[in-house]
Image (tube, helix red, strand yellow):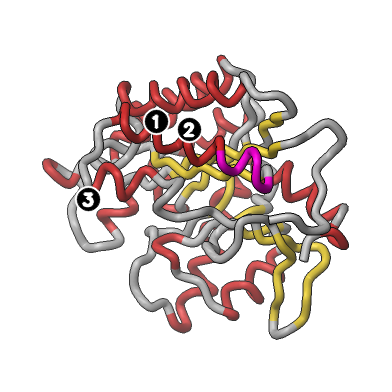
Amino acid sequence: MKGRYRWPDGVRCAVCLTVDFDGPSHETGRKLRPLGANAVGRYSGRCGMPRYMDLFERHGVPTTFFMPGFDAECYPELVQEAHRRGFEIGSHGYLHESWELGDEEEALLERTHDILTGLMGTPPTGWRSPSGRKSARTMRVLRRLGYRYDSSDKDYDLPYMVEIDGQRQDDMPELPSSAYSLDDFPFYRFSMTPPSEVLEHWKQEFDTLYHENGYYMLMVHARSGWGSGTPARARIVEELITYIKRHEGVRFFSVGGLADWVRENHASFD
């Protein structure tokens, strides 16, 4: 894709490596007790997120952790530690909602917003939908709460400006996350792909996007089970970082950091 978009001077490829926490909220929201075989979400707080904070800090890579409000209540110290270290925390539902929300959506969005704001002392500015739940109402509420970007949609290869009620929002970009091709969930949940093969796939995706449009958004989950919180699966993310760094003109961004650039240069993003 060759359009009007542009990155900062010297940047050929903008890379965002993101982690969805998806802790016990995922099971609790589905009316499962997060115990026994359903305890895999608790791994996010005990091992997964600490492991990724250390990994990204070791490599000097900014990132964004998307956090459900319920999980933030379960692990408040992790939210505060990530914020202290300079990582971005985005909002990701309250109970990782997988049902039709209706009139309760506004209250849930506000609840998580208030929880994260209270823990960090500053409000989150980005949101990623849990389980793909999003509507025109969602965007209106996020706008009212002061969110500055969304990273939920799967419909384009580059960032673009959000439309709310048919009106382009020049100060609120969408930063698409390409589900399935750059998401650990289908590999570890459905095809049971070995980490070594997942790494090769993600490298191939990077090679193509590096030459095509220079926008690479990876989504992993901090849990065990179908997530990437465990040592071998986290290791391939580390190997991917090393591989990406070998390429000229790469810059790693938090999602919020890249959203700032897109917002400031909104005329070049259709």
Q: Distance between the residues labelled 3 and 1?
A: 16 Å
Quarter in which the N terminus is drawn: bottom right
Q: How crowded is mark 1: few (under 14 residues within 10 Å), some or many (20 or more)?
A: some
Callout 1: helix, strand or loop? Answer: helix
Can you tell which quarter of the image residue 166 is in? bottom right
Residue 61 visible from this viewpoint: yes
Residues 166 and 89: in front is 166
Answer above or below: position of 187 versus 149. above
Q: Left or right? Give the position of 15 relative to 199.
A: right
Q: Do the residues labelled 1 and 2 touch (CB within 8 Å)?
A: yes
Give the mark, 3 or 1, whose residue is nearer the N terminus. 3
Quarter in which the C terminus is drawn: bottom right
Q: Position of residue 196 (x, y in %)?
A: 32, 27
Q: Where is residue 192 in the image (x, y as percent from the top left)?
A: 21, 41
Q: Position of residue 142 (x, y in %)?
A: 64, 67
Q: How crowded is mark 3: few (under 14 residues within 10 Å), some or many (20 or more)?
A: few
Magenta part mainly helix, strand or loop?
helix
Q: Which residue position is annotated with label 3?
A: 190
Q: Residue 199 carries which label?
A: 1
Q: Which amino acid does label 1 sit on?
A: Leu
Q: Is residue 209 magenta?
A: yes
- Which residue occupies the extreme left position in the image? 36
Q: Distance between the residues labelled 1 and 2?
A: 6 Å
Give the residues drawn in magenta, as a range.
Answer: 208-213
Q: What residue type is labelled 3?
A: Phe
Q: Which mark is residue 203?
A: 2
Q: Which amino acid does label 2 sit on?
A: Lys
Q: Position of residue 76 (x, y in %)?
A: 47, 38
Q: Left or right? Give the position of 69 relative to 197.
A: right
Q: Residue at left 55%, top 28%?
A: 81
Q: Residue at left 80%, top 43%?
A: 7
